[in-house]
Amino acid sequence: MKENTGKTKYVILGLLSHCPQTGYSIKKSIEFEYSHFWQESFGQIYPTLKALVSEGLAVSSDILESSDGRGQIVYNITEAGRAELEKWLSEAPDVEKIRYEILLKISFGTNTQSQVLLGHLDDFIERNEKTVSELDGYIEIFHVLKAQGEDHTFNELTALCGKYVYSAMRDWALDAKRIITERGEKQ
């Protein structure tokens, strides 16, 4: 289970502010649109939805039957939920903390063969290139939606940030490969 930062409440309120959703659709929205910088598990989403309802920040509707015959509860934000979301949005964000295991492995690189690190860097580069490509796809979708009259400026800005971050990490890995290779040639 992902670390519970206490922000799940606000992620869900933000998504519900766009439109009513089920727990499943909230999870899919997070995976599709926010996965480059935020994750939430079903184990965080469903208890938080229940808490939001008990706090009066959201309401649940009757159970709707899905295409697979399973019932789904649809949640909607309340005015109190909107006020809570607005209050949280006005607060300064927490200081970001990065956590990249590859940086630990590189920092301890004298304890392994250069080829091992180069392999890790190749995988890292590939993952980052794939993510940048996905984010470019999202940005293009936002441009198409804008041409159709839908404003997704703020979603586009988060995708653009992700593109810059993952591009920078890819570029770092390319430089790291070069430096490790040059170091090996000098020894």
Image (cartoon, rainbow, N blue to C red):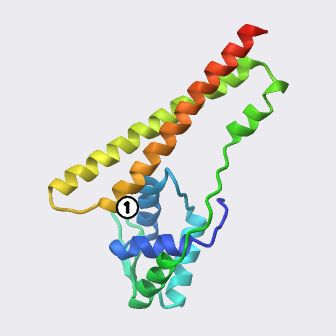
Q: Position of residue 31 (x, y in %)?
A: 46, 54
Which amino acid type is marked by label 1?
Asp
Q: In which quarter of the image is residue 109?
A: top right
Tell me residue 53's x, y (percent). Answer: 50, 86
Residue 8 point in image, percent of width and height = 55, 70
Helix, strand or loop at label 1? It is loop
Q: Which residue is drawn at 43% across and 39% down?
A: 132
Q: Nearer the viewer, residue 58 or 124?
A: 124
Residue at the right extreme, as displayed: 111
Q: Crowdedness of circle 1 by 10 Å Cα count: few (<14), some, many (20+)?
A: few
Residue 30's place in the image compared with 9, above or below, is above
Name the residue at the front extreme.
Answer: 186
- Label 1 belongs to which residue? 68
Quadrant for the C terminus, please. Answer: top right
Q: Residue at x 64, y 59 (%)?
A: 2
Q: Which of 140 and 78 is in front in this view?
A: 140
Does 165 sit left or right of 4 as displayed? left
Q: In this view, does 140 lie to the left or right of 53?
A: left
Q: In this view, does 63 lie above or below 110?
A: below
Which of the pair 63/187 is nearer the observer?
A: 187
User: Viewer-proximal residue, 142 or 59?
Assistant: 142
Residue 18, image x, y percentages: 33, 72
